[in-house]
Image: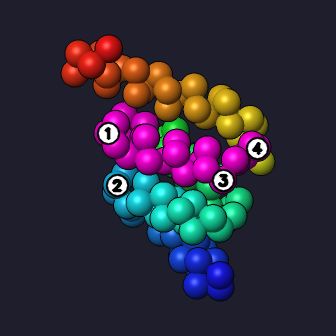
Amino acid sequence: MAMLDTIADQSIKQLDDFKPQEIANTVFHIATAGHHCPALFEAVARETLHRLPHFGPQELANTAWAFATLAVRALGGLGDVRAWSSGVGAALGWYARCWNVV
């Protein structure tokens, strides 16, 4: 899994330059591989909250799925994932209402 650690490390360094889809795809594929990268997930949580209005429903769903798949529970200085997921959940609910799917 050294390759995934390298991808995670490089992703953290370049996260500011990633588009929302690139952020979502990165954590989605790392979670699909079952690889735990706490530093990456903490950085992604921080970046997602910072840029929440720029994430579409698919990016939010894939990012949330990655966190749930790896059972990420705590995010260092960010506190409990529930606080992060409530922001993401609110955004997904807003998208659903906008598209009249609820």
Look at mark 2 in the image and give the residue it sits on: 21
Within 10 Å of the Cα at label 4, are there few (<14), some (14-19), or many (20+) other Cα atoms? some
Q: Which mark is residue 70?
A: 3
Give the vertical position of 85 relative to 13 (above or below): above
> N-terminal of the two: label 1 or label 2?
2
Within 10 Å of the Cα at label 3, are there few (<14), some (14-19), or many (20+) other Cα atoms? some
Q: Mark 2 and 3 residues: CB-CB less than 8 Å, in contact?
A: no
Q: Amino acid at mark 3?
A: Leu
Look at mark 4 in the image and give the residue it sits on: 74
Q: Main secondary structure of the magenta part?
A: helix
Which residue is at a point 52% across and 42% down the rendered structure image? 64
Task: State the CA–CA distance, disc 2 to disc 3.
Answer: 19 Å
User: What kind of element bears circle 4?
Assistant: loop
> N-terminal of the two: label 4 or label 1?
1
The percent coordinates of residue 95 (x first, y second) are 31, 25
Look at mark 1 in the image and give the residue it sits on: 56
Q: Quadrant of the C terminus?
A: top left
Task: State the CA–CA distance, disc 4 to disc 1.
Answer: 24 Å
> N-terminal of the two: label 2 or label 3?
2
Q: In the shown orientation, is residue 77 left or right of residue 28?
A: right
Q: Quadrant of the N terminus?
A: bottom right
Within 10 Å of the Cα at label 2, are there few (<14), some (14-19), or many (20+) other Cα atoms? some
The answer to whether one can see residue 99 in this image is yes
The answer to whether one can see residue 23 in this image is no
Which residue is at a point 59% across and 77% down the rendered structure image? 4
Task: State the CA–CA distance, disc 4 to disc 2.
Answer: 23 Å
Give the vertical position of 87 relative to 8 (above or below): above
Q: Amino acid at mark 4?
A: Ala
| Residue closer to the observer: 85 or 65 | 65
User: What kind of element bears circle 1?
Assistant: loop
